[in-house]
Amino acid sequence: MVATDVEYKVRRQMEAAKSLLASLREQGVEDDAELVVDTIEGETNLVEAIDAALAQIDECEVQTIGLSAKIEAFEGRKKTIGARADRLRALIEQAMLATDQDKLKLPTATLSLTKRAPGLVVINEADIPVEFWIEQERPAPKLDKKALTAALREENAAIPGATLDNGSFSLSVRRK
């Protein structure tokens, strides 16, 4: 960490005040608190250096608040840009599906569509049979989504409270 000018001044004045205090102790006047305070204030610039340090603390806090506001603004932008990219990906997927293309070679990238397996959709947990729940001490039994999904896929049967979706497509982009 790099010491600032203010830090240097506080350290320097602190050392001068310590030296002055040691001298006062040798003279036997350390019991007179008012004299010690007045002497340190009169012979050093410690109070002014501390005041400058407090001003710098205030400035640091103001900058921290300002930077936090900027970070929030950038986080908002980041979400907006991410959502735009997601919409564009979905649009590319739709265009490839509409034109029956599972692979598209472009000068800058190769795009591939792959079908994903149907995923679990929980409609109502209360209706799901007990055999798909894992007992736990706390807080409550946990739904075994893996077993439930496997049962729905293997048996191709209806299980109350859950079903499989139609599956989806995944767009892979390999950049050149």
Image (tube, rainbow, N blue to C red):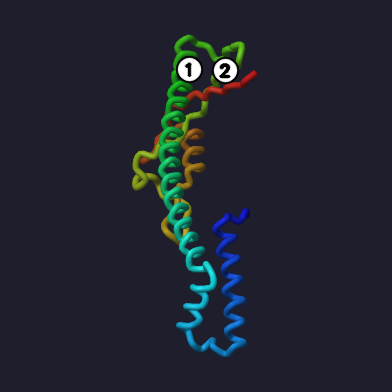
Three-letter code for the amino acid on which mark 2 is drawn? Leu
* Along the viewing direction, whichever of 48 and 123 lies nearer the viewer: 48
Rendered residue at 45%/21% (across/down): 88
Residue 77: x, y in percent?
43, 33
Residue 111's disc is 2
Rendered residue at 37%/45% (across/down): 125
Identify the mark nearer the N-term, 1 or 2.
1
Numbered marks: total: 2
| Label 1 SS | helix
Rendered residue at 38%/45% (across/down): 128
Query: Mark 1 near mark 2, Cβ–Cβ under 8 Å?
Result: yes
Three-letter code for the amino acid on which mark 1 is drawn? Ile
**Mark 2 Cα-neighbour bin, 10 Å: few <14, some 14–19, many ≥20:** some
| Residue 170 seen | yes
* Along the viewing direction, whichever of 23 and 80 lies nearer the viewer: 23
Residue 136: x, y in percent?
47, 58
Residue 92's disc is 1
Residue 5's disc is none
**Mark 1 Cα-neighbour bin, 10 Å: few <14, some 14–19, many ≥20:** some
| Residue 131 seen | no
- Residue 73's image quarter? top left
| Residue furthest to the top | 99
| Residue furthest to the front | 42
Rendered residue at 42%/59% (across/down): 139
> What separation in Å lies between label 1 and label 2 (alpha carbons)?
9 Å
Q: Is residue 130 above or below residue 172?
A: below
